[in-house]
Image (cartoon, helix red, strand yellow):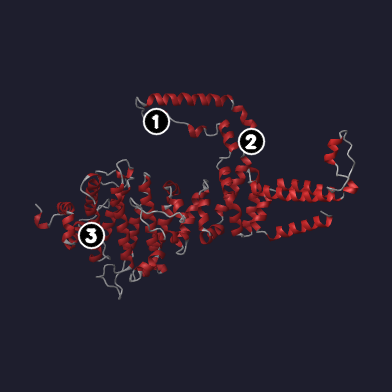
Amino acid sequence: MTLDGFLGFLALFIAFYAIVSPVTRLRAQLHLAVQIPLAILAASLVFYFEFFPLLGRPCRLPTAKACSWLAFPADGSFTPLQAAFLVVFVWMILAWSLNAMLRPGPRSLAAVAKIAQTLLYERRFAELLDFIRPQLGLVRAAAERRLRMQKVRDWLADANWLRRQQFKILKPAASEEDEPKQSTAGYDKRIREVFRRHIRWMRHLVPAGRKAQANAENIARMLLRSDEFRKFLVTMRPDALPDLMAVKLHLRFDFSDKVLQDLISDKGSGLYQEIENNQNLADKGGYWIARENVLLRFLFGDVAVTNELAAWKPVGDAVIRTIHEGKNTGYAAFLNGRPDNFEAEQWRDITFVGTRFFDIMVNEAMRQGISYHMWLFYVEHFVSELEASYDASGPDINVLAEFPTRSARLLYEAFDVMGNWVRNIRYLDSTSPHAAVPSTNQFSTGAIPADAATALANSMVRVALSTRVGDNLACYLHDCILDDIASLSPEGVQGRMRAHLIRVVVAGGNCHPEARYGQRLRTFLAMADHVLRAKVRDYVAAAEAAFPEPGRIG
């Protein structure tokens, strides 16, 4: 390779570097600590061979055989220019291989933070996401002190001593069978603690990794606190949201709340699309979550994530706020309009999609055995807000129709969802925490079917005593509860759930309703189909016993 050829190679390299994507150039900057020394060495060898006639020196080693490897052949079979070409060729292969194989390490986090900050300030959000997304694993590990050297240092320094303390007063009483196992486990633990104390001095030899942790936390803080970057993700790249919501720092909770609020408030968001495209039912209640629905799989693939993030709050609050402020925004007029085209509108309606969000979440909690009610009572509040804004007095409203208004249809959807949670007890085995049925009326038991029965009864009280909801709609919603009761077998756990549902509906949940509630229930029973009444004789008997006719008193 001549000097002109080498300069041409440099020109091509610069041109190639100019046309590659900005993200590729940014990633290349993370390996400069390796690439720059390699480039200096290669360029030095190339210039040496290019000017070999001026810089070359004769070999003065005592062994002629060694000189044969260090000197160029006299016959010209291998020249310095060819050596320069070989150096450039090897340099290209090594540079490409190192760039492909090397992964950023803890020391690269400072450069990552600097590049991310520059892109964030310049609002180059697409480039920032493409650059930072492959590094999020390293950022999370460093911020959570899960890097190898960080864990070794923390183990030697006993950094989790307070977290590992177990107070005897909080320990459950051990059975005789468990005592040998616990004593063995305690003996092994004491040996490890003694060994740790004797080698604790070694913590001074292991890097603490505080700088890497600080850089990682700084990167996470920049990403999670930027409102503009969050809105870009919600609007343009919702598939990347789970990666950031998985960063286990305290900032993630505020970030996830704002993300879910943005998603449920935007009728064209990815959350609406995923919920619409996730209607396939699972074998034992609930829904089958498709792999391409990345938001739903992140939130509900492991409901412990939903529980940790309290994902129900931003969604539920947004729905309640939207209905409550409907008179000022025009949403109330929409709700009180005719539902002629509701099937086409429902997947862009915040109340319907919010109800479906809770339906997927609560059913997954039951399927996965999470011992919590997931705040399903939000749906009861949806019913309260819908009832408060209900108005079927419009000139084009047919009050005798099955659903006079969109609000009426949404009330039915809420009742149907809560009833479905009650009915799904039939898919649970006896070991599930949600198969427990209380013997008394309680506000919250943590068992989803029982809590759903309470929410359903409270909703019935609200509708039954309403002066806005007409008798036809109230009776129809009452019939939905009768269908729920009839669908439960009178035997086993379903029988206990059936008896509990009857008890809480007759009692009015935990609302302590006025005496008029009993009269309303008797009216609804009189309006119900006789075939349906025949299927729920136990409910009819309970209602008649609790609310006897005035002529039969005494």
Amino acid type shown at disc 2: Pro
Q: Which mark is residue 207?
A: 2
Q: CA distance from mark 1 to mark 2?
A: 36 Å
Contact check, label 3 and label 1, Cβ < 8 Å: no
Q: Residues within 10 Å of mark 3 (few under 14, many from 20)?
A: some
Instruction: Decide if residue 319 is on the left or right side of residue 513.
Output: right
Q: Is residue 217 above or below residue 290?
A: above
Residue 536 visible (yes or no):
yes
Pick whichever of labels 1 and 2 is earlier in the sequence: 1
Residue 205 position, x and y percent, is 65, 31
Q: Which residue: 13% across, 54% down?
A: 548
Return the residue found at the far bottom: 395
Q: Is residue 60 above or below residue 130?
A: above
Amino acid type shown at disc 1: Lys
Q: Residues within 10 Å of mark 1 (few under 14, many from 20)?
A: few
Residue linked to disc 3:
479
Q: Residues within 10 Å of mark 2 (few under 14, many from 20)?
A: few
Front residue of this view, candidates 197 and 92: 92
Q: Which mark is residue 161?
A: none
Q: CA distance from mark 3 to mark 1?
A: 49 Å
